[in-house]
Amino acid sequence: MFPRARRREYGGPAMSALESFSGRWFVVKIGGELALDVKRLSVTVGHAVHAFLAAGVKVAVVHGGGPQATELSRKLGLVTKQVAGQRVTDEATLEVMKQALGGVGINVASAMRLAQVTAIATSGVSAGLVEATRRPPVQVAGEPLPVDYGLVGDVTQVNVTLLEALAKAGVVPVLGCLAGDVHGNVYNVNADTVATRLASRLGAARLFLVSNVPGVLRDKNDPTTRIAKLTPAEARAQIASGVIQGGMIPKVEESLAMLDEGIGAIHIVGLNPESAILDEARDPGSRGTVFIK
């Protein structure tokens, strides 16, 4: 799948640590805000993916596009509405998401190409890679009535066979967070949810949730307070005590739920230094926060 000559670029004990996962899946989720700088994305995420492939690891990339969608909505005069961190999606907003995610996917594919990674940018809609059903109205804390999120989907199925075929061909799928169904419906799905469900169905050894946040912080304004490792019990205690708060809560809760669904370990990690993702893969907890059972 990956040229032996290129594998030598990553020698030594660190490469051996990655090679222990040869034949397994790693899933990398990228926040939309990281796709604005293609060159930086290439030397951070792209470099890590290149090294994973060199070690014989199969890789899938999932990306969001929230900032891009919000900015495009603003330019079009559309009001962005979010409840509990999830975008309420009507027909117009869904069209915005399609356009925003398409642009982000092109940037991610460009970054992968700069890193000499063969990647194809698409979405979960293509060939039924990720299927979903429309989410029914749900009760949300702080809301008096059940919230109808509109054209937002809950993942029901992942096309593992096709993803395995892409990996066998040496291709990294780059998936925007849209899903569909056999009736031609398209749904907006939270990118963290797509990534965790994808990782679960693939039995991934590692899931990396990559953003501008270096991990779970005891003090959100102080990166030096990063917590290196958390078990589910410890993480829930941090939520209860208020250490984990705001937008980090759903990310953590999603991670904890998926640990019981077959994912080996889940990492929340940033891009500083440039080697952060690769360092975290080789030595869990060294650069981000790793959730382990």
Image (spheres, helix red, strand yellow):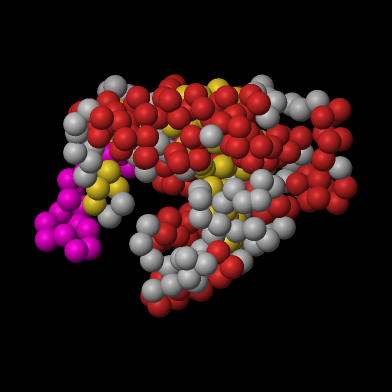
Label the magenta part by its dominant secondary structure: loop
Residue 20 position within the rendered picture, expressed as x and y whole percent measured from the top left: 77, 48
Instruction: Give the vertical position of 8 relative to 166 (above or below).
Output: below
| One can see residue 235 in this view | no
- Snapshot quadrant of residue 214: bottom right
Q: Is residue 145 above or below residue 77?
A: below
On screen, residue 164 above or below 241? above
What residue appears at the point 55 percent right and 64 percent down from the top-left corner? 223
Q: Judge from the rendering whether residue 191 lies leftward or rightward of residue 119; answer left or right.
A: left
At 27% from the left and 39% from the top, the residue drawn is 152
Q: Nearer the viewer, residue 104 or 154?
A: 104
Instruction: Report the quarter where the N terminus lies.
Output: top right
Is 279 situated left or right of 173 in this image?
right
| Observer-nearest of 199 and 189 | 189
Q: Quadrant of the C terminus?
A: bottom right
Q: Position of residue 80 (x, y in %)?
A: 23, 41
Horizontal and vertical percent position of residue 226: 57, 66
Q: Which residues are magenta?
A: 136-158
Q: Is residue 200 above or below residue 77?
A: below
The residue closer to the viewer here, 177 or 167, is: 177
Give the total of numbered labels.
Answer: 0
**Residue 207 forms part of the magenta stretch:** no
